[in-house]
């Protein structure tokens, strides 16, 4: 039986893309992922993730990723929720698989996990069983593998952004002091958000509001 796992990296950051990944494997081989330490990417160090990636690629039948860039997220959020945007792109990923899985395990962002499966179902063009669960990235090795693939690609995108501007932008998450410091300094210098910021995020809007409120007080 062919199964697949889906997870994302970068759902909450103010900088950079959200990356979605799907990986498929024969159910009989899934336990082999555990033999070299595969687990939810958040429970691994960057070095561990990198060392596991070649083994994952050799073991899985197929994997695909997609980046949802900040501009696309901002545009689509005018008329769809982030959960719906994610479901749309997951549907496209599944449709792109050469061999369709019989069961797909998905780490669910919806409060009611089963609702996320209903969202995805609208966007796929083949019959399969969708099992959307909270903590699927912990409970299913194939979802853990997808989470590692997504996380590595997301981290590479952030590293490339830092390299391109010649400055460390941190992880891109609002809780990262390096990211917030960079964002505040950028807005102070440029009176605008960087292109790689999600402008619809509250963190971005708060930073802009504080900048222009300060300018008004100085007038």
Image: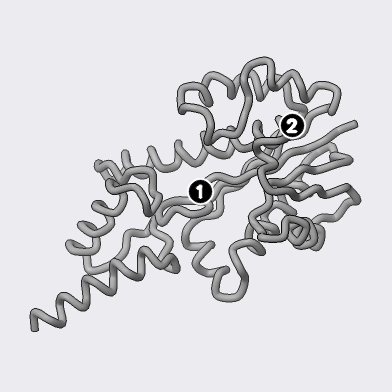
Residue furthest to the top: 35
Q: Residues within 10 Å of mark 2 (few under 14, many from 20)?
A: some
Q: Position of residue 77 (x, y in %)?
A: 55, 70
Label ID, residue 129: none
Residue that carries the numbered disc 2 in the rendered image: 62
Dot 1: within a 10 Å radius of its alpha carbon, few (fewer than 14), some, or many (20 or more) residues?
A: many
Asked where in the image residue 31 lies, by quadrant, the reply is top right
Alpha carbon distance from label 2 to label 1: 22 Å
SS assignment at label 2: strand
Q: Secondary structure at mark 1?
A: loop
Does 215 sit left or right of 72 as displayed? left
Frontmost residue, 185 versus 108: 108
Total labels: the figure holds 2
**23 relative to 154 in the view: left or right:** right
Q: Is residue 157 left or right of residue 82?
A: left
Q: Residue furthest left?
A: 218
**Which residue: 76% across, 47% down?**
94
Nearest to the eye among marks 2 and 1: give it: 1
Tell me what residue is drawn at x 28 percent, y 48 percent.
177
Task: Name the residue carrying label 1.
Answer: 10
Residue 140 rendering spot, x and y as whole percentages: 73, 34
Spot occupied by residue 92 in the image (x, y as percentages of width and height): 72, 53
Residue at left 44%, top 51%? 16
């Amino acid at each position: 039986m062919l199964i697949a796992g889906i997870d994302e990296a970068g759902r909450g950051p103010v900088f950079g893309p959200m990356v979605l990944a799907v990986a498929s494997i024969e159910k009989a081989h899934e336990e082999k992922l555990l033999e070299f330490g595969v687990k939810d990417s958040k429970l691994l160090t960057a070095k561990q993730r990198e060392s596991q990636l070649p083994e994952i690629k050799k073991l899985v039948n197929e994997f695909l990723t997609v980046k949802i860039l900040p501009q696309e997220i901002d545009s689509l959020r005018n008329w769809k929720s982030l959960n719906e945007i994610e479901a749309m792109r997951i549907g496209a990923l599944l449709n792109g698989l050469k061999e369709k899985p019989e069961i797909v395990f998905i780490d669910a962002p919806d409060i009611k996990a089963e609702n996320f499966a209903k969202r995805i179902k609208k966007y796929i063009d083949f019959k399969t069983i969708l099992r959307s669960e909270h903590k699927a990235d912990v409970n299913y090795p194939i979802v853990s593998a997808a989470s590692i693939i997504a996380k590595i690609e997301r981290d590479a995108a952030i590293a490339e952004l830092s390299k391109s501007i010649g400055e460390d932008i941190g992880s891109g998450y609002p809780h990262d002091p390096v990211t917030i410091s960079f964002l505040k300094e950028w807005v102070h210098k440029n009176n605008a958000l960087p292109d790689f910021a999600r402008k619809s995020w509250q963190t971005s809007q708060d930073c802009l509001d504080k900048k222009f409120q300060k300018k008004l007080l100085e007038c």
